[in-house]
Image (tube, grey):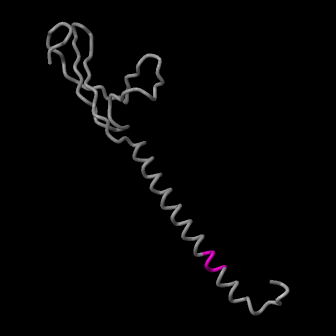
Amino acid sequence: MDCPFCGKEMKEGTIPSGAKWVEDGLDAWEGIPLTVGIFGTTPKSFYCPDCRRIVLPVPEKEEGVLDKMKQRLGEASEKLGAAREQWEAHRAQEKEEKRKKNFGTKDPWEL
């Protein structure tokens, strides 16, 4: 690749860290990731030794580890909610059956 600043040949390489580009005045969480995921792919970058500049294409956003964990947590939460509702319905049914079973054995003034 030719340098867009001086026109000379650039060296190809990568930036292996989980760095982000962040616009001035914004929080670091709002930046554009330069790598994808924690152990994600590192896009090719180009370095011009004459200008001492790096050109780095921004990768497409893929689902990172945190995104996957949030999705799985949401799914687990839904399953737990459904299981709890089922358990509560079963428990209410057991209580009703027990009440009906013991209905004739109690003193009518205790009901």
- Which range is magenta? 91-95
- Horizontal and vertical percent position of residue 57: 25, 25
- Please say if 78 is above or below 13: below
Chief SS of the magenta region: helix
Question: Is 68 placed left or right of 101 in the picture?
Answer: left
Question: Is 93 placed left or right of 110 in the picture?
Answer: left
Question: Is 102 placed left or right of 40 in the picture?
Answer: right
In the picture, which quadrant includes the C terminus? bottom right
In the picture, residue 31 is in which quadrant? top left
- Please say if 80 is above or below 36: below
- Horizontal and vertical percent position of residue 15: 30, 25
Q: Residue at x 35, y 38 (%)?
A: 39
Residue positioned most to the right: 109
Question: Is 51 placed left or right of 71 in the picture?
Answer: left
- Horizontal and vertical percent position of residue 90: 58, 75
Q: Is residue 93 magenta?
A: yes
Q: Residue at x 27, y 12 (%)?
A: 53
Q: Residue at x 83, y 84 (%)?
A: 110
- Please say if 99 is above or below 83: below
Residue positioned most to the bottom: 104
Q: Residue at x 57, y 71 (%)?
A: 87
Q: Is residue 98 magenta?
A: no
- Please say if 46 is above or below 37: above
In the picture, which quadrant includes the N terminus? top left
How many marks are shown on the rendered structure? 0
- Horizontal and vertical percent position of residue 18: 37, 30
